[in-house]
Image: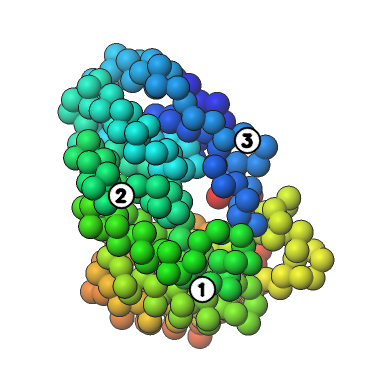
Amino acid sequence: MHYTATVYRPPVEANNILLQVTSGCSHNSCKFCNMYEGVSFRVSPLEEIEEDLNEIRQFNPNAKRVYLVGGDPFVLSFEKLKPILLKIKEYLPKCERISMAGRISNTKNKTVEQLKELRSSGLSFIYFGMESGDDETLLHINKKQTAQEIVEQCKKIEEAGIEYHLIYLNGLAGAKRGNDHALESAKVINQLKPTEISITSLTLFPGTELHKAAQRGEFIESTELERIIELKTFIEQLDTDTYIYVHYTTAVSLEGTFPENKQMMLNKLQYIINNFDEEIYRKRREKIRTV
């Protein structure tokens, strides 16, 4: 198998086939991220992908789920992505789900009809790093997308019948702006129908631009308690049918269908707020080394 860099995949994809289609991230300039530091963006040649598919077929011909590895394989054009999907079906005819990560802006280079064709070719699920629906925060972290664009492009994905996942990055706006970050992000998502929402919590990793800004005093990190209050505001304002779970970087464990479990989540968050120990959660965050 061809793996040219560290392989990142969502937890739920751990037991699925991991097929490298790209390596690195085509954007690779979000100020909070160091996942692809020093990794040049590369598109795997179709011949290389076929070699890997042939190897996969040897040991798991009945594979039903394939996750396309890379920071954002969805950046590939329709013309490049469709042949890859068809090759997967050719080598693994029992495959039922093909998923991948992508930037929401990757949708701009594809029409709704092309997206529908990708869906019929096997593309089932996309993980999008929305991070925020607040334009000020998006601009500050160099995400290169706006709240309006998030809504417009995700609606195209919905129209094509492709399921998708959105990531909300708690604490990303820093101290004193958590409320705006939560309100604006919920406002964006309430216009959409994501299959899942995961909630991560900002960790400042050395070497990232946001970490450097914090060292210069230009970015003030929110406290652990402020993050939980922000998260409670986000959950309070959220009003869409979805499934929510939190990443281990978050100080609280929440998981369940939404809005059915909304009140349970709010009750749990309020209990934690009422009994919060900043030092315990801060020491926990200091031990985090990577996403």
| Residue 250 in view here | no
At x 67%, y 37%, the residue is 38
| Image coordinates for residue 227, horizontal then vertical, percent | 55, 74
Q: Circle 1 sits in a helix, a strand or a loop, which is it? A: loop
| Image coordinates for residue 68, horizontal then vertical, percent | 39, 35
Q: Residues within 10 Å of mark 2 (few under 14, many from 20)?
A: some
- The residue indicated by pointer 1 is 134
Q: Residues within 10 Å of mark 1 (few under 14, many from 20)?
A: many
**Amino acid type of the residue tagged 1 in the rendering:** Asp
Q: Nearer the viewer, residue 283 or 93?
A: 93
| Image coordinates for residue 100, horizontal then vertical, percent | 38, 42
From what the image shows, is residue 153 above or below residue 20? below
Which of labels 1 and 2 is toward the front? 2
Q: Nearer the viewer, residue 259 or 50?
A: 50
- The residue indicated by pointer 3 is 39
Which of labels 3 and 2 is toward the front? 2
Label 3, label 2: how far apart the Cα atoms are: 30 Å
Residue furthest out toward the right: 216
At x 33%, y 74%, the residue is 190
Look at the image and tell me in which quarter the N terminus lies.
top left
3 or 1: tag closer to the N-terminus: 3
From what the image shows, is residue 144 above or below residue 15? below
| Residue 113 in view here | yes
- The residue indicated by pointer 2 is 111
State which quadrant residue 143 falls in.
bottom right
**Amino acid type of the residue tagged 3 in the rendering:** Val
Q: Circle 2 sits in a helix, a strand or a loop, which is it? A: loop
